[in-house]
Image (spheres, grey):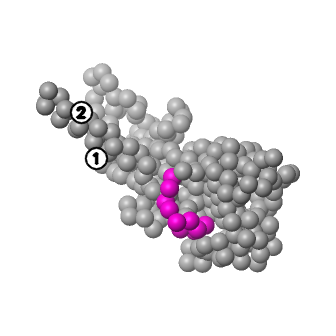
Amino acid sequence: MMRARLVLVALSCSGFLFAGCSQQPLPRLNHYVGGSSESASLAVSAQPAPISGSVTAGLLLINDTSAKGSAPALSDRAKAFLAKQVRERVETATPVRVAQVLDISNESLPRGQEALAQMAQKQGLTYLLVALFSSGESEVPAYLPITGDPEQGGNRPNIPGYEVVNYALAELALIDGASGQVVARSDGRAWARLNRLNMPIASNAYPVIHRSLRVAPIYPPESDAKDILRSVAADEALEQAATRLQEAWPKS
């Protein structure tokens, strides 16, 4: 009886451990838009007044790498790709229309409602759409199937390589330009895995990226493989966040 209880306790602890791992990285949005907690409870309207018609907003894209264990910063090319994806996904899901993308250095990023309101007013914007991307990443040696399939199985020979997994978090917030208050916010999570060989041989199966929400693999060039991994995971997290922003939209 005692042994059975110990097994149940161990399984419960394992469940909490995996649940904690699945929630990495922690939300970062409150560091920029204000708020007293790092709660992951999003998709909530913070302003009861409904919004009628389309909303014109400026896009502020942030790639936060300040948390411990964060993946390296996205390249300018990856950030440009994500800015395009934010515009397309958010405009498809909500009445927001992105009028311009703000080019702000990390050192000058506004923090808090007052700073956000000042930025919006300086740019002549009624609303500000904040899109924050962060991610954690792990890389370990691995033996990979020669065909590049995600599931090895059978007796196919394995070859030495590396496995990199990126866990991405996308957070969206629509900010009132007059007050700096959050009108609606949401988030989304996704992961992507990059497998690479650890030997100088030509292969049409590696490097390869497998995604959490898609079946088809991606075959990136070796030189940009990790940057593409991070941008792909971020885009899938953004897809969820845009859908949840639609659900959080203040409606009459």
Above or below — where is 163 with respect to 101?
above
Question: In the rendered image, which residue does mark 2 sit on?
Answer: 8
Circle 1: element type: strand
Question: In the rendered image, which residue does mark 1 sit on?
Answer: 141
Task: Give neighbour class at mark 1: few <14, some 14-19, many 20+ (Cα, 10 Å).
Answer: some
In terms of depth relative to the viewer, which is nearer, 31 or 207? 31
Circle 2: element type: helix
The boundaries of the magenta stretch are: 31-40
Q: Are marks 1 and 2 in contact (CB under 8 Å)?
A: no
What residue is drawn where x is 49% and y is 60%?
38
How far across and how far down the image is residue 82, in percent?
62, 55
Amino acid type, callout 1:
Pro
Q: CA distance from mark 1 to mark 2?
A: 32 Å
In terms of depth relative to the viewer, which is nearer, 108 or 36? 36
Indicate yes or no whether the magenta region holds residue 229.
no
Q: Quadrant of residue 1?
A: top left
What residue is drawn where x is 13% and y is 31%?
2
Above or below — where is 68 with respect to 45?
below
Query: Magenta stretch: dominant SS?
Result: loop
